[in-house]
Image (tube, grey):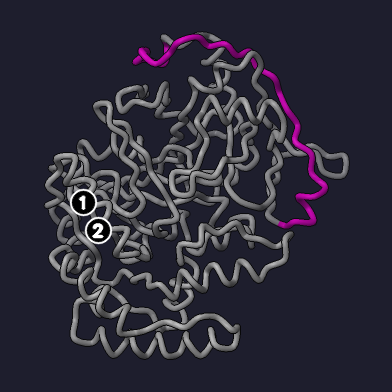
Amino acid sequence: MAKVNVVLGTFYGDEGKGKIIDYLSKDADFAVRCTGGNNAGHTIHVDGKKYAFHLIPSGILNPNTKAIIGNGVVVDPKVLIEEIENLKANGHEVNNLYISDKAHVIFPYHIQFDQLLEDLRDKDDKIGTTKRGIGPAYCDKFERSGIRFEDFISDRFEGLLKRNVGQRNKILELYGCEQFDSNQILEEYKQYAEILRKYVTDTVSMLHEALEQDKTIVCEGAQATLLDIDFGSYPFVTSSNPTIGGISTGSGIGSKYINEVYGVLKGYSSRVGSGPYLTEEDNEIGDQIRELGHEYGTTTKRPRRCGWLDLVALKYAVMVNGITGLAINHVDTIGKLDTIKLCVAYKHDGVEDMKFSTNPDYVEKCEPVYEEFEGNFGEISHIKNREDLPEKAKKYLSRIEELVGVPVKFIGTGAGRDELIVD
C-alpha cells in the first residue's frame, strides 16, 4: 500500500519543517504543499546555499520528487514565478513542479484588503497579518467568488476578473480608497498565466494514480497547529487549517492512506505577530535565544518572540493531529544556554495540570510551571547517533518524550541539511 507521511508544525510556525520535509523527500515520489500561501516560509541549507520557499514544496530540490502545490493553497503568481526563476538561477530545471487546477489565485485587491482591514483594527486587536492577501483570498474562496487556476488559464478569466474588481471597487469607494484598474491587472496577470500554464494539472487524480501505484508521498503543512483557524489561538491565527485535516482537504488524499504524522518543533519556542504566548521570555533570555537561533521571519524578516518550550501546548498538538513522532530542531541552539527551562504544566486557580485551552479568559489566569535542565551541550552538529549525544541533551529529550507520550524521531543538531539525527 502507498505510504503517505505528513509533516506538521506544532506551535506557531517557523519550526524548521523544511529540513524534515527535505530529508523525507529524498525517498519520496511526491512532495505536496497542502495549505496556506506565501505568508509561510521554509528555509533549507544545501551545499552552502540557502533556499527560502514560500509556495513551492521543499521537496522540489530532489529532482526525482514531483513537487505539488495542492488545491488548498492560495497562490500569488508573481511570487511563485520569482521562486521558479530563483531555482533556475541556481541550476534547478523545475520540471518537477505541478500546480493544482483547484488552487486559488491571489490578486492585488486581496493584498489591499488585507492591509486595509489590519489598519482598521485597534492597536490591541492587530492580528499581525503578513499583509500578503492570504485571508481575503480564502474569504473569496468560501464566499464562492474566488478564481481558481483552472479559471486563470481559461477564456473565463477576463470576465471573472472584471466582475471581481468591479465588486471590490465598490467596497473600496465606501472606504475612500483608491480603486483598481481591471484592464491593468488583466494585462499583468495574463502574462503570469502564460508562464504558469504548463505547470497546472488535476493534482487530485495525479495523486490517486500515485496511491494506486504504491508511490511514497510526503505532505507538508504550512504554519502550525496553534495558528490553525479552528484549533489555534483565535483570532491570532492564519486563515487555513495547517493541522491534519488541512492535509486531506488541501490535497484530496483520504485519511486511510496516511502513515506517519511527524510534529516539528524547536528546542525552544517562538512566535511572530500578536497573540498569547505563555512561555515567552520578553527579556535578555528571549533576546539571547533569538540571536542564537537567528529568529527572524523568512517571509517578513520580523524579529520573532522567543521563549521556553511548552509541553502543555505540544501535548495538545499531538492530540489534535494524531502525531506519531516528533522532530526537534535547534537542539544545538538551546544547548548553548547555561540553564534551560521546560514548561511541564500550567497552574490555573491553584491547580497544576496539562490542560490546554485557546480560551483567552482561561489563558489569562494560567502560569507556566517549569523544570530546569543543564545546558552547555557543546558542539553536537557532527553527531549522527542519539546515544552519542551528551547526557544533558539526552535527559532533556527524554523528558519531552515522557510527558508528551510520543517518541523523538528526528533531532536537528545544526542548520545544515545533513546536521540531523534520525532515530
Closer-to-camera residue (380/135): 135
- Crowd tier of the residue under label 2, counting other residues whose Cα lies within 10 Å: few below 14, some 14–19, many 20 or above: some
Residue type at mark 2: give it. Ile
User: Residue 130: where, in percent of width, then height?
Assistant: 51, 57
Residue 252 shows in this picture: no
For the point 35% across and 36% down, which residue is it? 20
Label 1 near label 2: C-beta < 8 Å? yes
Residue type at mark 1: give it. Glu
The residue labelled by disc 2 is 81
Distance between the alpha carbons at the discs numbered 2 and 1: 6 Å
User: Residue 378: where, in percent of width, then height?
Assistant: 50, 9
Closer-to-camera residue (198/418): 198
Q: Is residue 368 magenta?
A: yes
Residue 129 shows in this picture: yes
For the point 57% across and 40% down, which residue is it? 303
Give left or right: position of 304 versus 339: left
For the point 50% across and 31% down, which residue is it? 294
User: Residue 200: where, in percent of width, then height?
Assistant: 18, 67
Residue 340 drawn above or below residue 161: above
Tell me how many marks there are. 2
Residue 278 drawn above or below residue 202: above
Q: Is residue 154 magenta?
A: no
> What SS does tag 1 mark?
helix
| The image quarter in which residue 81 lies | bottom left
User: Residue 78: where, in percent of width, then height?
Assistant: 30, 62
Instruction: Tell me which segment is drawn in magenta.
Output: 359-387
Residue 85 is labelled as: 1
Image quadrant where one finds the C terminus:
top left
Residue 248 drawn above or below residue 11: below
